[in-house]
Amino acid sequence: MTEQRPLDGITVVSLEHAIAAPFCTRQLADLGARVIKVERPGTGDFARGYDERVRGLASHFVWTNRSKESLTLDLKQDEAGAILDALLADADVLVQNLAPGAAARMGLSFEALHVRFPRLIVCDISGYGEGGPYEKKKAYDLLIQSEGGFLSVTGGPEEEQMAKAGCSIADISAGMYAYSGILSALLLRGKTGQGSRIDVSMLESLVEWMGYPMYYAFDGAAPPPRAGAAHSTIYPYGPFPTGGGGTVMLGLQNEREWAAFCDKVLLTPALAMDERFSANFKRSANREVLRQIIVERFAQLGVEAVIQRLEDAQIASARVNDMQGVWDHPQLKARDSWRDVDSPAGPLPSLLPPARNAAFTPRMDGVPALGQHSQGILDQLGYSVEAINHLRERGVI
């Protein structure tokens, strides 16, 4: 029996750049969708130029663009519009994260497209969503982290110690909601026969993730303090130094674990009943005193010894890995989590999609060169070699 993927036969056309839309459509490609990535001739997705860290290719681009076909198209030219129309006539989904209002000005609003392509699903990704005073405001990941309150709860306690996330979490959250929104729209179309529009706001995507600190500060209450890599309200929870200059990350969630930690890790069982530390809110309020006790005990041990005691006590712990440590992570190796994918720079390792389904193998095809598939796509649309050469000479593709 031929293996089937969930989105085999689904075609996605994407006017995308940067991270949010490309991350969404790459995951659709993982499930078998054909993703046609429309890029500007000559330059392409501007994420191609972010850096040259991956054998001359950009790290962001390699991460979010495997398994796609790259079609160069200058959408400002009339001939490009005819090509895009031909693609959309057979497409199931259009995804775009162009500048606010740009898609609508090109006649690519859901309302305009729905008349001609009633089964087409349109997903618009923007910084702030349609409507409201921020509708046309430019938005980048760091700016959304700021507007969405993330910076206010991340980093050290002083104002100048606020910190952004080390990865593009605002883009990632929007990409994830676009991805799940498209999957739900495909299910809906199966029931109604009609396409629908998905309006994804980066701000709303990140604010959804901020639910805990927002409710913690509900009705004017004080927000959780910035606590660096520690937990703002649970203690002990976070990084602790060990002898030899190492660091261990640990976390306690309940009183049973606190008692086991005192007994089997600190070897001071009586500490569990110390009135200053006998409940989580007390430990959190007295964290500086408790931290000093833990640091003094850990200073006599190396990382491996501390982790072994934590394991024996069934206390959650982790090593603080750098990026090389993640590339070499024994759990990822044991689970065979990496696959080689092709690219203009040769084979590159790529992580399997985290949600593994035993019924099918995810698609793990190459990262495309700019315009790599233009001729093949136009040939499928019925363009002759002469017509394709004409489009290339005019800079349409």
Image (cartoon, helix red, strand yellow):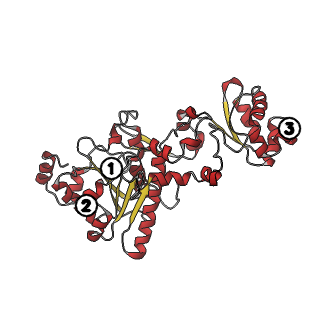
Could you tell me if residue 313 is visible in this image?
A: no
Looking at the image, which residue is at 53% across and 35% down? 323
Instruction: Tell me the crowding category of disc 1: few under 14, some 14 to 19, or many 20 or more residues within 10 angstroms, Cα based.
Output: some
Instruction: Tell me the crowding category of disc 3: few under 14, some 14 to 19, or many 20 or more residues within 10 angstroms, Cα based.
Output: some
**Please, what secondary structure does the residue beneath circle 1 have?**
loop
Closer to us: 301 or 101: 101
Looking at the image, which residue is at 69% across and 23% down? 244
For the residues labelled 2 and 3, the Cα–Cα distance comes to 69 Å
For the residues labelled 1 and 3, the Cα–Cα distance comes to 58 Å
Instruction: Tell me the residue that label 2 is attached to.
Output: 107
Q: Earlier in the sequence, mark 1 or mark 3?
A: 1
Left or right, 310 with reference to 51: right
Looking at the image, which residue is at 57% across and 33% down? 161
Residue 315: x and y, percent?
74, 43
Label annotation for residue 271: 3
Residue 288: x and y, percent?
74, 33
In the displayed image of the protein, which residue is found farthest to the front? 220
For the residues labelled 1 and 2, the Cα–Cα distance comes to 14 Å
Residue 359: x and y, percent?
50, 62
Task: Indicate the amino acid at tag 1.
Answer: Ala
Label annotation for residue 99: 1
